[in-house]
Amino acid sequence: SMQHLAYHHGYLSLRAFVLQFVAAALAIASGHSVGREGPHIFLGAASGSLLGQRLSLPNNAIRTLVACGTAAGISASFNTPLAGVIFALEVVMMEYSLASFVPVILAAVSADAVSILVLGAEPAFSVPRLQMGSLAEMSLVLLLGVLVGAVAAGFIQLLESLGAGSRDIPFWQRTTLAGLLVGCCGLLVPEVLGIGYDTVDQTLLGTPGILMLLGLALFKVLATGFSIGLGIPGGLIGPSLFIGSVVGCLAGKLVLQLWPGIGSDVGFYALLGMGAMMGASLQAPLAALTAMMELTHNPQIIMPGMLAIVVAGLTSRELFGKDSVFVSVLKARGLQVEASPALQALRRVGVASVMETRLSRQPQRIGREQAKALLQGQPEWILIEGGGQPLALLRALDLALALEQEAATELDLMEIPGRRLQLAPVQLQATLQEALQQLDRSGAEALYVERMTAPGIKPIFGILTREQVESAYRP
């Protein structure tokens, strides 16, 4: 979804929808260490994109529909509508805006309602009532955050290395190798295969022993790295929650052995590990905290959860220099995701809301009386056409001055004094980001906004200059 937002303006195809559905189902059913929420997100985003394309909506509206589908996928996966909203805006859109909040919230609520109606209201995890024993444990929570942040950094590094190293290997060879490696991990520790939510439930209860937890943590990281890093379609959130819960449970057991009277259950640290690993690997602290709160229905988990999540995220990003796992995977494929404030401002606005519509289309040579008549309509621009194609753009003011200075009965709009702007086309559905890219790519000074209404018929709706584009992010 992030790749298509960054490079294809949110356009996803029906072919990609079907392939993701089938491939993800096969990957999960065959035991690969991937999550179900990743395909849910992609299918939701693709549904929103296909709907926007079907309705011929502007590209900035299609981006919002992609975010709606993303929020719906998370909401239906975990029965956490608020976490779905935060995830869509924080991770996929990489921005918070009032225009996006309302439709994304409605999509998340609708998806959650449908999920409850069809599948019931059972939570994704069986989370017991957990809380911190005393404030003395805050130092242990901080250390847990550092530990989980380091694990998240190692996990991301493994994905980066496998993704970059296998980029030139044919797809069928990569997936075959992934199957062999994950199968070997499963022979040693069968619990790492598949989604693994049952193992997460066991860690929340503190059931596995220390040696078992060590094996689960190591081989789950390897199995997930082999699956995702070598191109198996699937989600990363589920494996992140698995790894975090195992590391947290392991830390909790060690703490209880060293400090028997601490007062907190092992499951408390497993839950904090889940949130910390999700926040650090996705670099989405608010989404992780919201997910923890919705999964537990326990506001007392918020304070220690905030500390663990923030410390884990800072450890992974600042100490080890790691971006979010999604950005890292894209970088390993040679792709770059930008989220500067100026770029976000341009993506939010469509050309239709900024273009100048006071436009008159005229041939290169017009009579004096015809020129006076068109000026009575008070156009801002005159689009000079020749051979059925736009030639240049002239300010109507320059034509008015030429009428005052010249007495000729016929005027050549390409010869009269005035500044004529070179033109290039842009589609009516485009965003200002696309318009700026078209200006830079073509070397034109202005764009004429067109839309194909029938084969071979492209009416022009307005004019867009570079100054109008830049006004969207410059005061």
Image: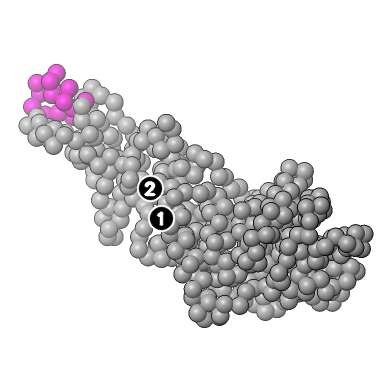
The answer to the question of whether label 2 and label 1 lie on touching residues, with beta carbons closer than 8 A, is yes
Q: Residue at 46% across / 42% down in the picture?
A: 345
In the rendered structure, the answer to whether residue 403 lies left or right of residue 236 reads: left
Residue type pointed to by label 2 = Gly
Picture coordinates of residue 178, whole percent (x, y): 75, 69
Q: Is residue 77 visible?
A: yes
Picture coordinates of residue 183, whole percent (x, y): 79, 75
Q: Residue at 16% across / 26% down in the picture?
A: 400
Q: Is residue 422 magenta?
A: no
As drawn, the residue found furthest toward the right would be 258
Residue type pointed to by label 1 = Ala
Q: Which residue is mark 1?
A: 61
Q: Which residues are magenta?
A: 398-412
In the rendered structure, the answer to whether residue 137 lies left or right of residue 79 reads: right
Viewer-closest of 261 and 309: 261
Helix, strand or loop status at disc 2: loop
Q: Is residue 232 visible?
A: no
Q: Residue at 88% across / 62% down in the picture?
A: 261
Give the quadrant of residue 375: top left
Give the quadrant of residue 355: top left
Give the quadrant of residue 130: bottom right
In the rendered structure, the answer to whether residue 128 lies left or right of residue 123 reads: right
Q: Which residue is mark 2?
A: 350
Viewer-closest of 86 and 218: 86
For the N terminus, the quadrant is bottom right
